[in-house]
Image: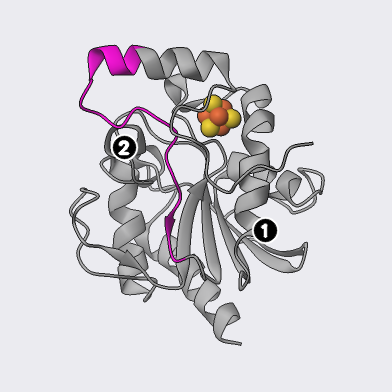
Amino acid sequence: MTAFPPEAPRDCPLCPRLVAYREENRRQNPDWWNGAAPSFGDPNARLLIAGLAPGRTGANRTGRPFTGDGAGVLLYQTLIRTGFARGEYRADPDDGLELVDCMITNAVRCAPPQNKPLPVEEATCRPFLIARLAALPRLKVIVTLGDVARRNVLKALGLKGTAAPPGHGVEAAVGGYVLLNSYHCSRLNTNTGRLTPAMFEAVFRRAREIIDT
Ligand code: SF4
């Protein structure tokens, strides 16, 4: 089997439905990124944050994970408050924001229609996630944003998707790392109060505690 690199090529051809969606987005918005979104952050990070997939008007538009859509505001503000980022988040990949001891990736690197990748697309993209995990030599903590990200990380570690329980703030030792699961910081979750800024920040404060132990 050919070894995958930790980052997918921008024009990765492996998922026909996602390639078709990418091409449709290119026709409609030729100035957008419209490609596999690369991970962002520190290559020596001890914290990896795993999301599900780029949002159409977020990373698919700007080329940086969680940049440009609603979910990124809470994520980056929280990372700045907990010392995992420095600078100012201005929803623009050229805003100069830096991640500190932290990297953000997505389980599926291309934007899916309705933000819902198919299981076959999650499986096809998983070798990139496996390579991403393997390429972080100091990795200690993985924060998964939502249950699909949690299941994909577990599978990337060679475990069953049920190897760690779901739920916000749930912590499990898996594959030599600590997995911390969080509700996704989507506008849907924050607008309904399912996830508050304090609940979200608590996850990253716990990640900090584990890293500093
Ligand atoms: S989702 Fe992953 S495997 Fe599928 S086309 Fe995009 S980069 Fe390639």
User: Which region of the structure is painted magenta?
Assistant: 24-42
Q: On the image, numbered disc 2 is attached to which residue?
A: 58
Q: Kindly state the secondary structure of the residue where label 1 is placed.
A: helix
Q: Where 12 sits versus 151, above or below? A: above
Q: Kindly state the secondary structure of the residue where label 2 is placed.
A: loop
> Which quadrant would the N terminus be assigned to in this image?
top right
Q: On the image, numbered disc 1 is attached to which residue?
A: 134
> How is the rendered protein coloured?
one colour
From the image, state whether disc 2 or disc 1 is nearer to you. Answer: 1
Magenta stretch: dominant secondary structure: loop
- Give 157 or 115, whichever is nearer the viewer: 157
Q: Where 191 sits versus 206, above or below? A: above
Q: Residue at x 20, y 53 (%)?
A: 94
- Give 82 or 168, whichever is nearer the viewer: 82
**Magenta stretch contains residue 76:** no
Can you tell me which quadrant of the image ligand 1 is in?
top right
Q: Earlier in the sequence, mark 2 or mark 1?
A: 2
Q: Residue 180: give x, y in percent of width and height.
A: 61, 62
Q: Residue 25: give x, y in percent of width and height.
A: 32, 17
Left or right of 153 in this view: 111: left
Query: Is residue 151 visible from the viewing direction of this image?
Result: yes
| Crowding at mark 2 (Cα within 10 Å: few <14, some 14-19, many 20+) | many
| Crowding at mark 1 (Cα within 10 Å: few <14, some 14-19, many 20+) | some
Left or right of 42 in this view: 88: left
Left or right of 77 in this view: 122: right
Q: Where 92 sits versus 49, above or below? A: above
Q: Residue at x 52, y 71 (%)?
A: 44
Inter-mark Cα distance, 2 to 1:
26 Å
Query: Is residue 150 visible from the viewing direction of this image?
Result: no
Q: Amino acid at mark 2?
A: Gly
